[in-house]
Amino acid sequence: MRYRTVCFVLVSLMSAVFSVRAQDAVRSTSADGEQLPEAEPVVVSATRFDIPLDQSPASVSVIDAEEIEQKQIERVSDALREVPGLSVVQTGAPGQLTSVFTRGLRSAHTQVLLDGIPVNQGLQGAFNFADLTTDNIDRIEVVRGPQSTIYGPSALAGAIQIFTKQGRGTPGVTFSEEGGTYDTFRESIASDGKIDNFDYSIGASRLDTDNARPNNQYRNTAAIADLGLSLTEQLRVGSLFTYSLSDIGLPNTIFNPKPLDNFLTERWLIGPHVDWKATDWWEHKLIFDYDHERQLNDPNQDGPFGVGPTRALFRRTQLDYQNDLRPASWLTLTSGFFYSHLIAGQERPFVSQLFGPQPTFVSDETKEIAGFLQATLTPVHNLIFVAGGRIDHFNQFGDVWTYRIANSYKIDKTNTTLHSSVATGFSPPSSQDKIFRFNPGTGPLEPLQPEKDFGWDVGFEQRLWEKRVTVGATYFHNDLSNLIGFSGLFETLNLGAAETQGVETELRATPITDLDFRASYTYLEAEKTSSADVGAPQGSRLPRRPRNEVYVSASYLWCKLRTTIEAKWVNAREEINPNFFGPNRDIEDYNFVNFAAEYEISPHMSIFGRVDNLTGEHYAEVFGFPALGTAAYAGMKVRF
């Protein structure tokens, strides 16, 4: 790590040079010195086209780049901890498997998109947030409730859509360097801008940390770029590029530590896209993308004797076309076509050939073709009604139909928005479900069918004090069926069922100039309602789903010093019984407090620092995998 220290010193010297040449920034204020409310943000994820947030027919939360920077958030998973209805579960220290449960549903039930591209990967079909950094991110939109009608597979719980920055204005560059506890060093670079008709945004970072336990080191390199060429004012051709390489140690639980076990994951994606606004009432969007993931677990010490190195491969090609037609001022018709072809497999060179030829590579090939149609109506002022349907055809189990009906009504006099929705969603069996399906000699089994959900919600959002304060609450309910589980003969079948319901609330406030306050609370009941799946007793609580979660944060700008404090409290949860029989195991509740500060020495230089887990809480989000204790980090940024 010695070269990290040298880089830190070099950045410091560069920063000093820029600070000498810089002049104080000029901050604009209103006539009375108070901060005026910003224009209502626009969201895309609720309908697949631009719509004001205060008229969204779905329950949506938005995290923008400014908030991410204020809290010094470096991974998307940490940003999602403030969103109501979401539970983030990290298997120990940073770099380990990180899952997100939406409204009590499994992590594979939430579709993750990057600039409109579905990026759920791997044999499990779920997205691992461990390596997803906040480099080059403009905003994150979280829409809750079944969204399979517009986003297809895996969106039965909701969708998390991440939007990259689009270059505008004079090009600029930002460098940052930081170091801290657990021999941690991180460097990053970001640049964006527009030159004539060409726009670009680029972000890249490198993280090295040893974390707290032996064999728990984490190395991550990430890069993301969005390039575009505006051929005319109505036509833009661009492409998204992403790359990440992570290398982690797997120490296992504290009860069964492993001194040597390494896991490497490499991912890359390329996504050319075309946005064409043919007329004021007709728009087209076309995305073609290819993504690739490879994993190497070496030496792989799982099991009592270890099984030797294993390799996994994931390749996918997707095509997404969207057509927005506005034949009347009160009607928008959104239709589209989707195609996906993925191959996922695992190489197992350790398989013995002693008793005859055995496959050393098992794989799964899935093809999907889908079409959807959605009508958005505004028959009267401030009333939005959305209805849509979709059909997905899979090569292995046939057709799946889904629908969605949603609406919102904004009352101008009280500045209140009412919203509700009812929808169906589905999640296809993962490659892992199909490849490692257990069949104890009972003959061929019927193909696994998609897991399904019928969900509905109803809520409101109230803006007060000239929009300085916004409060919202939503009640939700999900009935899940066809869940994949084990029968009494341990056959993998569609035989499970579950129910989740609860309330999610959110508060956003700017009571005085330069003071931002956020708070959220989620109450969740998540229960298994089937006795056919022997994995856990009927009536047991779904594992790793806390009943109560509370998040609060406050950020204030003291002239040129920005300070931010955030706290999270998570109620006790249950963990899966390792023996598959009997009640689940309890995990204690926990809380943590993080503090961050940044001082702007000049428009071209700032220094920052933060303390995570300020109170030194001892806790584990997954039983046996402890989170880090108190950790402090400091660094600086150079902008020009």
Image (tube, rainbow, N blue to C red):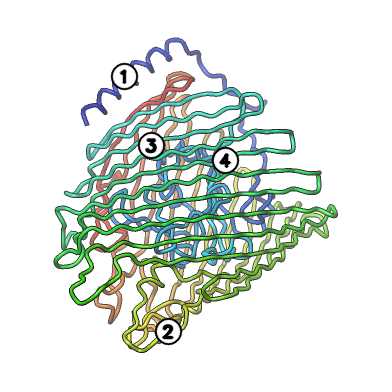
Q: Please rate how many residues cluster around mark 4, counting C-alpha atoms within 10 Å: few if below 14, some from 14 to 19, many from 20.
A: some
Residue corresponding to mark 3: 596
SS under mark 4? strand
As rendered, which of 99 and 72 lies closer to the eye? Answer: 99
Q: Earlier in the sequence, mark 3 or mark 4?
A: 4
- Report the label total: 4
Disc 1 from disc 3: Cα separation = 24 Å
**Residue at the (66%, 65%) spot, across then down:** 420
Give the amino acid type for the residue marked by disc 1 in the picture.
Leu
Q: Please rate how many residues cluster around mark 2, counting C-alpha atoms within 10 Å: few if below 14, some from 14 to 19, many from 20.
A: few
Q: Earlier in the sequence, mark 1 or mark 3?
A: 1
SS under mark 3? strand
**Residue at the (16%, 49%) spot, across then down:** 214
Give the amino acid type for the residue marked by disc 3 in the picture.
Ala
Residue corresponding to mark 1: 10
Residue corresponding to mark 2: 445
Disc 2 from disc 4: Cα separation = 43 Å
Q: Earlier in the sequence, mark 4 or mark 1?
A: 1
Q: Mark 4 and mark 3 in contact (Cβ < 8 Å)? A: no
